[in-house]
Image: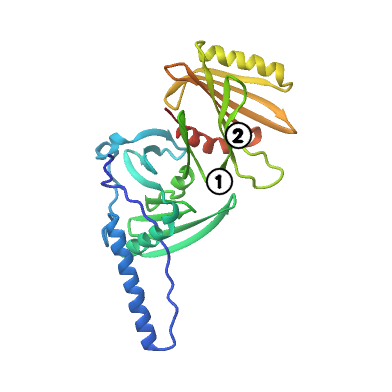
Amino acid sequence: MIKLAYIILALGLLYSCNSGTSKNNRTKQSGSTQAARNFLIEQAENRGFQKGVIQHALNTKWSEFADKRFYTYIKTLKSGMLLYRAEIPNMMMEVYVLNNVIVIQSSSIMTGKETQQIYMEMDAWLKSCNPISTSNSFAVKDGEVTNTYEYLFQDFTATIIKRELGIQYMLSLNGEKKETASQESIILDKQFSNKYFSIKYPSSWQIIQEENQVTNNTAISLQIMERQKNDYDFRPNINIIVSNKKWRESTAYLAEQTSQNNRRLIRSYKQLSTSNDVVLGKCRGSLLQYSFSVQGYQLKADQYIVKRTDNTTFIITVTIENCKYSEQNKLVQSILKSLIIN
């Protein structure tokens, strides 16, 4: 079990108080509002939050961070920050380290139907910590409304990003780019599982088909795709095929055969690269990258061919419009990293 000594998840709701027509009404309303806040704080404390106290690891040396053994290095951002991530069921925790000091910590959690309630509780808790000021804003992306709330304290800022089924809570030293963690973190609040594998994906994607037979040797176990936003954009998608045949040939051989077949079947097919030392879902295999065009779209595909130790073969194909590959591949890679092959 990961120790959560310095990591706190929070959500919130900004309250408003309607003015009454008399002093008595205002007094009663104020008392009622305070009672409601006290109740929410009690609920927050039941979840492990301490009234008036924000625990954090900001300004802690990474070399002295108590829980660092649970974190995996992900990448170095353009700002020079090193991103480390820990994942447990329904939760993702991240820390951003600059010059051996933690400058941002972020936690994302799938809250489901409890999103609004937890949000209200954590807002009351954060306000009990006496922020200097608060602010909020919202944005709409891919049909989803995202609410962002900021609580300014003397040395750091707490940020809550509330989505439909998930919440991200972030603490950052004042002066650091708070949007860094917001842009880098992706909430995968949906999950598909069968006897072969499990994979997570965001609510902005959907399952198109599952468990469909293709040939005697292959079956599409899953096809997930970005939800339709309009009638003209190509929708990035991921197909996962599990072979019924236990292929003894190497994945390098299977990738080469696949490429040769594609050349015969797809007139616009162009092989871009092949790598025979990849790991996906904790299984080793090959990655075949190629481009092709269909119905006026110029597409790029990443096709992973990986095998379990019993030679069960998995073919995972990602297809993205070439001109949007850099942008959309960030989300796709987050989805692929969640893949667990049983």
Q: Viewer-proximal residue, 218 or 114?
A: 218
- Image-based side of 322 in relation to 30, left or right: right
| Mark 2 Cα-neighbour bin, 10 Å: few <14, some 14–19, many ≥20 | some
Q: Is residue 115 above or below residue 301?
A: below
Q: Is residue 211 above or below residue 207?
A: above
- Tell me the quarter of the picture where residue 140 sits: bottom right
Residue visible at 44% across and 87% down? 21
Q: Viewer-proximal residue, 242 or 103?
A: 242
Q: x, y (%) of residue 172?
A: 37, 50
Give the quarter of the figure containing the C terminus.
Answer: top left
Q: Where residue 204 is drawn, which disc sits there? A: 1
How far separated are the C-alphas under marks 2 and 1? 17 Å
Total number of numbered discs in the rendering:
2
Q: Which residue is mark 2?
A: 325
Q: x, y (%) of residue 160?
A: 42, 55
Asked which secondary structure carries label 1, the reply is loop
Residue 129 seen in the current view: no
| Mark 1 Cα-neighbour bin, 10 Å: few <14, some 14–19, many ≥20 | some
